[in-house]
Image: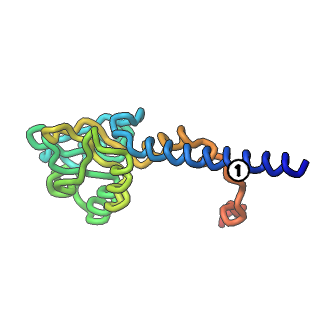
Amino acid sequence: MQDMREADQAEEQQIAQERTHAEGHLEARVLHRPIWELPTLQPAITLEPSATVRDAVEAMQQAQMSCVLVVNQGRLAGIFTERDVVTRVVAQEIDVDHVQLQEVMHPHPDFLEMEDEIVYALHQMSLGEYRPLPVVDEQQRPIALVSMQDIIGYLLAFFPQEGFNFPPSPAHRIASARDGA
């Protein structure tokens, strides 16, 4: 009887090791897939460098996007983000109707190509503290945007147990606020 229990335990341990090994391979395969496999890639919104800040903000609001890509002759020349609105426009009290994007954009932004791997996109976003990153074609023409949210959503589809089944944590409870506090 004892031998059967030990054999069952050994078999269960072997199955657990095989599952862990298989999950590790799944993780590697998912992370090394190309960007074009992300189902939520957003089309890029582009404006010319001569467009005004107001044009950019209105385009961002209308498309519900966090940035616009600035193109010169169809090629990526810069990026203008919500963060730029706060730090370069509002904080500087700039006239949004007269200041052009070329004056407040980030020139020569980092970008991805459709064949770049998801893990590379995560690496670039982490290094540069980027939320969205432009995706360009071979001629550096913007074709899409990829965000950290796109990638996290994609990964959670593969690992729902790991992403959605955390037990409550006392450190993350939201304290009830008093009225007026």
Q: How is the image coloured?
A: rainbow
Depth check: 128 or 173 in front? 128
4 on left or right of 21:
right
The residue at 34%/50% (across/down) is 121
Numbered disc total: 1
Label 1, residues with CA under 10 Å away: few <14, some 14-19, many ≥20: few
28 on left or right of 177:
left
Residue under label 1, please give it.
13
Residue 91 lies in quadrant: bottom left
Q: Secondary structure at mark 1?
A: helix
**Where is residue 73 drawn, in percent x and y?**
8, 39
The residue at 33%/62% (across/down) is 127
Q: Compared with residue 71, is residue 89 higher up or lower down, i.e. above or below? A: below
Depth check: 110 or 94 in front? 110
* Quarter of the picture holding the C terminus: bottom right
7 on left or right of 95:
right
**Where is residue 110 drawn, in percent x and y?**
23, 53
The residue lying furthest to the left in this view is: 73
The residue at 10%/43% (across/down) is 72
**Where is residue 38 drawn, in percent x and y?**
40, 36
Residue 124 lies in quadrant: bottom left
Whether residue 178 is visible: no
Callout 1 amino acid: Gln
Q: Compared with residue 89, is residue 57 higher up or lower down, i.e. above or below? A: above
Whether residue 23 is visible: yes
The residue at 74%/50% (across/down) is 10
**Where is residue 59 drawn, in percent x and y?**
29, 39
Depth check: 125 or 15 in front? 15
